[in-house]
Amino acid sequence: MAEERNPKAFPYAQDDLQTSILELIRQTQRQKLVKRGANEVTKAVNRNKAAICVLAADAKPIEILMHLPLICEDKNVPYVFLKSKSALGSACNVSREVIAATILKPDKRNSKFEKEIFNVQDEIERISAVSE
């Protein structure tokens, strides 16, 4: 069965980028640098605390999180869609599906993640620029 992707889910991360994003979420979750859920992500982006915004492309209906790309573009936060809300939930270390998550900007205690977050931000911006 072919994967049907919602055309509104743009930019969409390919498998290798999805794997690296999910692994980064797993690592930063242990340090309390991840907020999950559309409401928490919206608050983090509006308060300029978000470094990366990750959205699930299989959210039904997709419109419940389509305000986030607009806010992210306004605040210059890179965002990307992943294929599975269940994979995002598992990376966030919860048993439920998660439709949106954000990695917060690391503080001085968590500066070891700065380079990895910067690399992922760069990849997201690259796929956004190529597809436009």
Image (tube, rainbow, N blue to C red):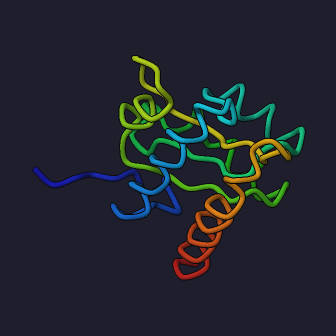
Residue at screen point 78% across, 47% down: 105
Q: Is residue 92 above or below residue 10?
A: above
Residue at screen point 83% across, 42% down: 49
Q: Return the residue found at the far bottom.
A: 130
Where is residue 11? Give x, y as percent: 52, 63
Where is residue 40? Give x, y as percent: 72, 27
Q: Is residue 61 above or below residue 11?
A: above
Where is residue 130? Give x, y as percent: 54, 82
Q: Is residue 13 above or below residue 55?
A: below
Where is residue 125? Give x, y as percent: 63, 71
Residue at screen point 61% across, 68% down: 119
Q: Is residue 2 left or right of residue 22?
A: left
Q: Return the residue found at the far top.
A: 95
Q: Return the residue found at the far right.
A: 47
Residue at screen point 50% across, 30% down: 92
Res 14 quadrant in image: bottom left
Considering depth in this image, is 57 or 31 the residue closer to the camera?
Answer: 31
Q: Is residue 113 left or right of residue 42?
A: left
